[in-house]
Amino acid sequence: MARLFIRGQEGEFVIKAVIIKYLYYSIMLSSMLVVPANGELRVVCYNVAGSGGSARTGMSTVLNAICTENVNGIVRPIDLLILQEVSGNGGTENDIIAILNQQPDTGPYLKDTTSTYACDGRHVGLVYNSATVNLISAIDFRHSGACRDNARYQIRPVGYGPEADIYIYNTHLHSSDTSERLAAANIIRTNADGLAADAYVIYAGDFNIDSSSESSYQSFLSSGNGQAVDPINRPGTWHNNPSFKDIHTQAPMNNPPGGLIGGGIDDRFDFQLVSTDLKDGEGCSYIGAGIGDISAGNHSYHSFGNNGTHPWSSGAGNINHPSNTAQPQNVLDALTTASDHLPVVADFQLPARMQVIVDSIPNDVEQYTAVEIAVTIENIAPVNLPLGADELDYVLSTTGDIAGSATGSDAAAGSGNIHYITLDTSTIGMKTGQISVISDSQNASDPCFVQVVEFNVYGSNTPFCVNQPSTDLSGDCKITLVDFAMFAEQWFYTEANDPNILDIEPVITGIIDGTLSGGTPKAVEIYIPGRRDLSQYSIERSDSGGTWGNNTQLTGIYENTFVYLIGSDNNGEQRFNEVFGASGFYANRPLVSILINHNGNDAYRLIKDANVVDQVWMQNNSPVYMDSYMYRYDRTGPDDGFVMDNWYMPLVDSGYDLSGLDAAGIRAAVPFGDYVPPEGAQLPPCYYGYPESDFDESCTVDHNDLQELCTEWLECGLDPNSACW
């Protein structure tokens, strides 16, 4: 809360602020407009032995038990179910979806619809809770001669941007051929090594291996961008070894029902390996004992239904033996009929999400008044427990006529931290300052907050009017001959309303998704008709067809020129300079930000006073300018939205993209700076305000304004405590 001690009349409390939030974006696909994820992520890998096209008996009991299991205080429905041995027609997944959709406060659950190859009919698949995660992309691939496809899913927690994406590899390695297993592991690692060095990666599946020394397993653990680690760090020879009976996953029963493999619980075939960035306790991370600064008492990774309390019978034991205390007996019995594997379950924390709330700033403050303003900084990651999200580390700083700083950390699921800043009221006049809060927590959402503040400091003898009329030009709370003299200076000033002048707003004229290093440069071109103050405008982005978000104010005053919004990731501004240079209108850059980070299917819109001025592309996931560009046709726009007929789209029209071109080639191909505005487009009359003496706002100081001045002079409609001369 603001603490104010003001002598005299308090002014209207208003905030004159610019709120800038960088970071790709809290964006959801428009087809999944649901509440943000309320909790951590529960990930399950399960070979369901369902290639026959349906889920087996007991599956409902098993899945419901996973959804209600308490691990480290976390109880939540399954978010991601990574499946092996499902049918190619989707029947198995449909049965599972019907079961999971009975869970309260979820979904709906959806499945990956990518068609995969399996020579033996044993496909891989994915079912996910659309209330908590979005499936951004899915691809399938295999090495030459392989029997089955591997799949890669790009997953994004709801309410987060691309910085929180998790890549999941789903594989079912060969049951008997070690060379085939190695070939599959190698091609998966090759694909993963093409991701960013700090990418979040999960390698899940039925690996069919006996020990950690096998070459395929070592391929996953080898160095490189996608290097994997075992979350529970249990290397060794797992097969038929009682030292590892608490992590064995196959087979739940010695003599199972028909169609299932038996032999007893003596193998660790099923895994969730993670990349090193998913096991550091920062950002998105595996939750387990001893993982970074996560306060978990136990590993969340476990073979469901197996805590090692079943008897060891030379590897021929049954998971549903009465001595097993991992689950109730009915769940243990269901595990023996639902599949010939046990599910592998693990929980993951989400990155921090920063929210900053600055209390109201007074518009007018008397000199020497002490004013404290509360700044609340909170980690609003949508979780139920503090260990469900990374802590929010931040630095609060101020500049200008504001004082105060702080460093702090806020755990999720709390009420935030309150810090106080002070206004400098030691001198009279207009004051400005900036409040900044920056978080360096790994891949935090909305990590940068900036608010610019203005306030006026007046002296104790400064006149302070009530309902001061516009005709008091001198501002002394009196209408006097001084005001008449000031009025005379603008007498008959006229700014004619030329009927041939077109009053048009700035126009988005082009967008490029470059193909230099890191997919750069990425930029949006805007044409400025006449003279415009871009601080009156902001830009919003729709990520991959998702909702509009990350409203960011532009800056600078420009006149009859082009300006560029440039992506800063991967040295994006430097790449822009290499292609287009940094002189002439290419030097006009009202925004260089990580916000400008499109991939050919993102849309932007220009906003003024909460209204859409212009827009490039729409809320649609189609990659219409991926590795290419779009450019507006001459003398069109702005459109208050996206009008496809007004745009040249070379990728759509002719399949043309910028692949293989160097900087000079891209410059020659992309027509930035060529747009021709409509005839007569220029600044409208009185765009930047009416003359001070133009009381009726007609763009002309005339007899009507003189009449208003005289009326006010005669009626003396001022503060009754002030003289009217």
Image (cartoon, rainbow, N blue to C red):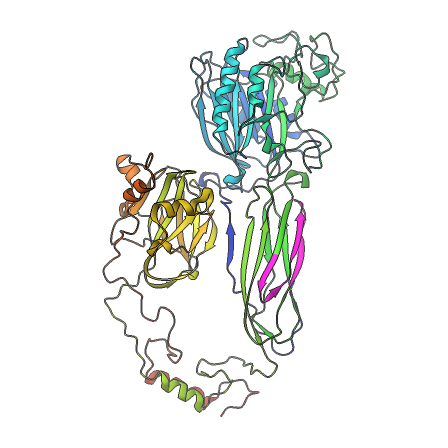
Give the quarter of the figure containing the N terminus. bottom right
Q: Is residue 65 visible?
A: yes
Residue 106 placement (x, y as % from top left): 57, 35
Residue 393 placement (x, y as % from top left): 64, 47
Compared with residue 460, is residue 232 higher up or lower down, i.e. above or below? above
Relative to 44, is 296 on the left or the right?
right
Compared with residue 307, is residue 410 higher up or lower down, i.e. above or below? below
Q: Nearer the viewer, residue 455 or 434?
A: 434
Furthest residue toward right: 323
The residue located at (50%, 90%) in the rendering is 724
Residue 270 placement (x, y as % from top left): 60, 19
* Quarter of image, res 14: bottom right
Q: Nearer the viewer, residue 242 or 111?
A: 242
Furthest residue toward bottom: 725
Magenta region, mostly helix, strand or loop? strand
Q: Is residue 94 visible?
A: no
Compared with residue 577, is residue 113 higher up or lower down, i.e. above or below? above
Magenta residue span: 397-421
Relative to 674, is 196 on the left or the right?
right
Magenta span includes 411: yes
Q: Nearer the viewer, residue 383 or 230?
A: 230
Residue 365 placement (x, y as % from top left): 60, 73
Count of labels in the image? 0
